[in-house]
Amino acid sequence: MIISPCISICKTDPQTGYCYGCGRNNEEKKMWKLDSTTNQWKQDNLINIQQRLNGWQLESFKDSYKHKIENGISLYKKVLNNE
């Protein structure tokens, strides 16, 4: 099973249509939820979205996604829960 790249920062850039948090567009977000979506497509999509991100946004995504995989919760949600 491949964990969704959603890191709970769900705001879409109005010019590009990509989420500021995970870098996906709305169609890609829908694809992740379909039972018929293959793991290969998800792996390829993870590569594609990381190619869209750069600088601090890419580093933030990588850190939060790694934390989500290892701990079951994004860094953003972890911070919210600790406040």
Image: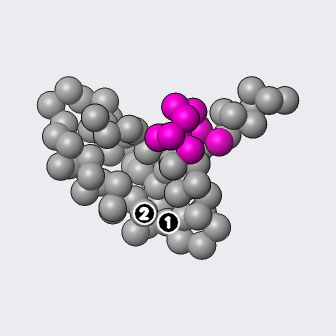
Residue 5 visible? The answer is: yes
Of 26 and 39, nearer the camera is 39
Disc 2 packing (10 Å; few <14; some 14–19; many ≥20): some
Q: Residue at x 24, y 29 (%)?
A: 34
Image spot of residue 24 (x, y percent): 41, 50
- What amino acid is at disc 2? Gln
Q: Which residues are magenta?
A: 67-75
Give the mark count.
2
Name of the residue lying farthest toward the right: 83
Q: Say whether residue 69 is magenta.
A: yes
Tag 2 residue: 50
Q: Quadrant of the C terminus?
A: top right
Q: Say whether residue 22 is magenta.
A: no
Q: Classify mark 2: helix, strand or loop.
A: helix
Location of residue 59 by image quarter = bottom right
Q: Residue at x 28, y 35 (%)?
A: 1
Q: Is residue 30 left or right of residue 64?
A: left
